[in-house]
Amino acid sequence: MNIATPPARINCSEEEWRIRCDLAALYRLVAHHKMTDFIYTHISARVPGPEHHFLINKYGVLFHEMRASDLVKIDLNGNVVEDEPESKPVNAAGFTIHSALHMAREDAFCVVHTHTAAGIAVSAQKHGLLPISQHALKFYGHLAYHGYEGIALDLDERERLVADIGSHKAMILRNHGLLVTGRTIPEAFNMIYYLERACQAQVAALAGGAELVLPPEDVRLKTAAQFNGNTPEENEAKLAHFEWSWPTALRLIEGDKIDWRS
């Protein structure tokens, strides 16, 4: 049986198509782990090259249905840079948030933004993410916060997003949700998975009403260092681990009716 080549695959480099496939898979993994908000959040990845283009979701496609050909290539001004751009609309607020980090951070290859119940709940708690779980300690001393300014349509907010996240890879958007970056798509998946689980654990613990136990400061710092590494060699080892575990994550979405690689 002959399978038609997706239009997006035509004139697309092997490297870009690989990124498209991995990004579509990440959308489906976010859906698998119930971190979606209908069609209203975004995951983006940079396309290698001097043009500074990046890929983001076609507005209106549900995350569990995302395919490599559904992703839209846009520039840093939000313009669609593909044939028939009118057939691939994107969300303006998604462009604002994601372009800010792609523009400012070379290491922000992939950016994930979610609106989960647990993430929004913690974003509205004045104390923020508490160091009460192993998942939360991954972000101890490595988490930023950004105050709510309304729906992210104002391009001026990009400067404040960048200033607030600083050199961190994860940020809680107050009264809004979660934001993480990754040097690779597998790293971004690991970051959002751990941050979401940390928020879920916190909401559950606070709901119990009992007094919380917090690890001592030295244990918090030790655990954060174990997660994040202190040397370039340790950081590279972490990246290798994310790459190693990525095929395992992909097995969760194998067998979908429509392949994400189409």
Image (spheres, rainbow, N blue to C red):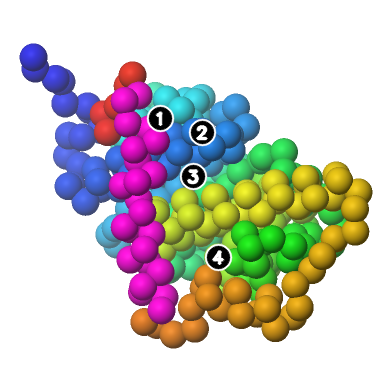
- Is 156 within the magenta? no
Question: 196 and 124: which one is in front?
Answer: 196
Residue drawn at the location 61% of the way across and 80% of the way down: 222
- Looking at numbered disc 2 in the image, what kind of residue is underneath it? Ala
State which mark lies toward you, 4 or 2.
Answer: 2
Tags 1 and 2 touching, CB below 8 Å: yes
Q: Which mark is residue 43?
A: 3
Tag 1 or tag 3, which sits nearer the N-term? 3
252 in magenta: yes
Q: Position of residue 205 (x, y in %)?
A: 80, 50
Numbered circle sitting on residue 169:
4
Q: Spatial distance from mark 1 to mark 4, Cα to Cα?
A: 25 Å
Q: Nearer the viewer, residue 137 or 10?
A: 137
Residue placed under numbered mark 2 in the picture = 31
Disc 4/disc 2 C-alpha distance (Å): 22 Å
| Residue 74 visible in the current orientation | no
Which of the two labelled residues, at mark 4 and mark 3, occupies the earlier sequence position? 3
For image coordinates 40% across by 82% down, the residue present is 232
Q: Is residue 173 above or below residue 253?
A: below
